[in-house]
Image (tube, rainbow, N blue to C red):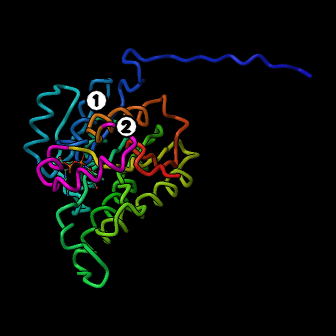
Amino acid sequence: MVRHAIEFSFEMGENGMRLTGKVIIIGGGAGGSGEAVSRRLAAEGAHVAIGDFDFDGAERLAAEIGDKASAHRFDLRDRASITAMIESVAAVQGRLDGVHMIAGNPTAMPHDADLLALDFDIWQSQIDAHLYGYAQAAKTAIPLMTGGGSIVFTSSNSCRGVDVTRLGYQTAKAGVETMTRHVARRYGKQGIRCNTLSYGMILTERAKAGLPQKFIDAGLANAWSPRLGKPDDVAGIATLLHSDDGEWITGQVIDVNGGALVRG
Ligand SMILES: NC(=O)c1ccc[n+]([C@@H]2O[C@H](COP(=O)([O-])OP(=O)(O)OC[C@H]3O[C@@H](n4cnc5c(N)ncnc54)[C@H](O)[C@@H]3O)[C@@H](O)[C@H]2O)c1
């Protein structure tokens, strides 16, 4: 039997995670976990295009990060604005390597409680933002990622039975998890990877201000961790997924949840 010597080569970029020179759009990159992802990807060497409907916030963050960042106005509920943002970033930067969709639509949640009380306008607003919005982002980005690329969506553990409220939201997020596998399989051979980060409770400033304490206590009780999640927990795994070190990871829904769904 002939044995072939296999040579392993592993070139680390100057920043460790091999992101240098990549252009990555963060949809919802001005606040919460999006801000942490924007800061970390820029620190690892990428150009971050920070898209947000809080354009002032995106501009402030881009100015703070410096010449590795740019600010873009978009609203996840407006598909034309998603296309415009992605096309303009690719045209101005001359390449597109990553799209990370974080923005969501939590405002409707109090009116999204159960099926018999279902308001179809609320249902539609959830589907529009999470499903149409994320699909539009991937549909626009894939043909522009001529050198391959990484798409990351954001989901919620709640779509897998953590609680029985938020029907439209959870249904839309379940669709995002399914779309992840479609994109990964359909476009994988052309070098496109697609993964979803599915969050447990991440204590952003907005979550701290808006969530009732008993909800936060329940989140902590569910997690196999001494603490709840923080935005930087998302930034670390996002960095891996967008870097060359994540090249063999695709089609995955990765829980960032302190083990909250582990039972038995
Ligand atoms: N924080 C949590 O505990 C938690 C849990 C499960 C899932 N999620 C998911 O995380 C995402 C939100 O991230 P977060 O909680 O870290 O921070 P967040 O809610 O502060 O949102 C991040 C950024 O998205 C922007 N944004 C919101 N709606 C937008 C829209 N329609 N168009 C453009 N930008 C918009 C915000 O201005 C903000 O800068 C959502 O997809 C949500 O479903 C969060």
Side of 252 where 189 appears, left or right: right
**Mark 2 touches mark 1? (CB < 8 Å):** yes
Q: Amino acid at mark 1?
A: Arg
Indicate the position of residue 4 as horizontal and vertical percent values. 80, 19
Q: Quadrant of the N terminus?
A: top right
Side of 198 where 71 appears, left or right: left
Residue at the farthest right position: 1
In magenta stretch: residue 48: no
Please tell me the numbered disc located at residue 14: none
Nearer-the-camera pick, 257 or 79? 257
Is 24 rendered above or below residue 84?
Answer: above
In the rendered structure, which segment of residues is drawn in magenta?
Answer: 204-226
What is the secondary structure assignment of the residue under circle 2?
helix
Indicate the position of residue 264 as horizontal and vertical percent values. 53, 52
Q: Amino acid at mark 2?
A: Ala
Distance CA(mark 2)–CA(mark 1): 9 Å
Q: State the residue position of label 1.
A: 40
Beta carbon at label 2 within 8 Å of ligand 1 = no
Indicate the position of residue 62 as horizontal and vertical percent values. 15, 33
In magenta stretch: residue 211: yes
Q: Quadrant of residue 48?
A: top left
Q: State the residue position of label 2.
A: 238
Nearer-the-camera pick, 262 or 21? 262
Residue drawn 21% across the image and 38% down it? 35
Residue drawn 33% across the image and 39% down it? 234
Side of 57 where 48 appears, left or right: right
Residue drawn 11% across the image and 46% down it? 55
Number of numbered discs present?
A: 2
Indicate the position of residue 102 as horizontal and vertical percent values. 29, 49
What is the secondary structure assignment of the residue under circle 1?
helix
